[in-house]
Amino acid sequence: MRLDSSTRSTIDIPALLAALPARIADIPALAAARDPQHVALIEDARRLTNAQLLEAVDAAAALLRNWGVRGGDRVMIVAENSIVQIVLLFATAKLDAWALVSNARLSAAELDAIRAHAQPRVVAYAVESSADAQQHAQRLQAITAPAITPDIGAWSYTIDTIAKAEPVEAANHRQCAALIYTTGTTGAPKGVMLSHRNLLFIAAVSSRLRKIGPDDIAYAVLPISHVYGFASVCLGSLHAGATLRLAPRFAPEAVRRALAEERVSIFQGVPAMHAKLLEHLQTHGHTWSAPHLRFAYSGGSPLDAALKAHVESVYGLPLHNGYGMTESSPTVSHTMLDAPRSDCSVGEVIPGVEVRFVGLDGVDAAPGEIGELWVRGPNVMLGYYRSPEQTRAAVTEDGWLKTGDLARQDTDGALHIVGRSKELIIRSGFNVYPAEVEHVLNAHPQVVQSAVIGRAVEGNEEVVAFVELIAGAKVSPAELIAWCGERLAPYKRPAEVKVLAALPAASTGKILKHRLRDFV
């Protein structure tokens, strides 16, 4: 079954694509021309207007150029969400170099592996805004960068004078803008090459569908080193003329205060962020206050019905949902602003993108049936850096990206993600989708979040669940198994429930299931 969403949309996709800027670095230039004094970025006491952002980008680009950065070079930016990070990624793009955005919270071994694979000419460290970046910079004896005007915060750098540049392409759909290494939720990270058009398409479509404008303030806590924080939150907001309120990492009290006191109108997070914010409100007895909030969104991990209902009852707004992945820049679908859903569907496929559902036999599944989700459109990556074999395995010759996710589609176009094809558990010949078990566990009032994996046993598989509980929880693993037993078929019930103080997670909040294997 295939569906081209553009036939249902009022957005003229060919016109939108034709009107996109040539490079993501054009975003600050266009914003400065449109409204130079509008505040673009807020980082605690530091603020930059559109005009100041453009000035800073030009100054940083001049530094990079003086250090030998050319088109096709990689510039690795080790940071947490900050003004210096955004300035550097635009400055990199201005030179037709590739912005390799990396989270400073990664370990030394992880960053070293990425650096060795990508071979960047310059590595920049946001040392003032991130203690972790400061530690990495000290370890590698980075040099303090000259101060620029306006002040963007201190940073340091190293240079590799023998790094080789990649070819530069004039067309925005062929030139790489960003190199994003996947979080490794399934193992070894891969470098995903995203073009300027990939990112600008998502920025334009997502901001239009969310009706973002200059009056909006978006709380940017999703890491900009992650594709959703980069493309949709950062680029999408700035493309639409909104203000970004930058937060380096998720802290429930900081979110609560920003929503209550800083006129934040857009809050996007992973389900765990919403769950932990609600837990914080309950634990500390805070009254909910978000007088300007108009759009709340959950993505990055499956959203369960219990959390959605709880969030909506507290926020007083629909909790929108969506689906994407790094390789699709990231957005494939999300619920529509004027048509929120009562279920946990990830919404409609965004305009300009096609999807299909492919069975194990390689044949398209019947309408409404489950199949592997394939995606095609202006959001599909250029490929994996220095890995043509992996690229060929992921993207067909005619442009279909194989997501590895199992999904189905309702007759009204709503997309439902059933689970990862590699995570499917086969118990006594029956298919068990981990998300289904996780939804039941997450509905328990003492469970913050859960993760389910399969465990091989005597030629079969059994279900093993890991849970993170609220503070002061009294529920036992046996009681949680009984809870599932009342709500699931026998073959879906966990054979074991393990309680962890915190589930292993990436900086985005996405649960790293492969690390749970260590506890089995």
Image: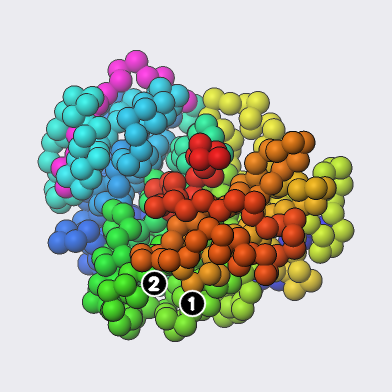
* Magenta span: 153-166
Q: Is residue 366 left or right of residue 139?
A: right
Q: How is the image coloured?
A: rainbow
Residue 123 magenta: no
Residue located 23% across and 24% down the image: 140
Amino acid identity at mark 2? Leu
Q: Secondary structure at mark 1?
A: helix
How many marks on residues? Answer: 2
The residue labelled by disc 2 is: 278
Q: Where's the C terminus, which quadrant?
A: top right
Q: Is residue 147 left or right of residue 101?
A: left
What x and y, as percent, mark residue 312? 48, 79
Residue 346 appears in the picture as rendered: no
What x and y, as percent, mark residue 134? 20, 37
Residue 153 appears in the picture as rendered: yes
Determine which quarter of the picture holds residue 287: bottom left
> Could you tell me how far apart the alpha carbons at marks 2 and 1 are, in whole angstroms?
8 Å
Q: Secondary structure at mark 2?
A: helix
Say the numbered circle drawn on residue 310.
Answer: 1
**Predominant secondary structure in magenta?**
loop
Determine which quarter of the picture holds residue 443: bottom right
| Crowd band around label 2 with a 10 angstrom C-alpha radius: few (<14), some (14–19), many (20+) | many
Asked if residue 361 is positioned above or below residue 294 in the image, the reply reads above
Asked if residue 468 is positioned above or below residue 392 in the image, the reply reads below
User: Quick check: marks 2 and 1 in contact, CB under 8 Å?
Assistant: yes
Residue located 56% across and 64% down the image: 479
What x and y, as percent, mark residue 70? 36, 28
Amino acid identity at mark 1? His
Residue located 80% across and 52% down the image: 430
Residue 160 magenta: yes
Residue located 39% across and 52% down the image: 501
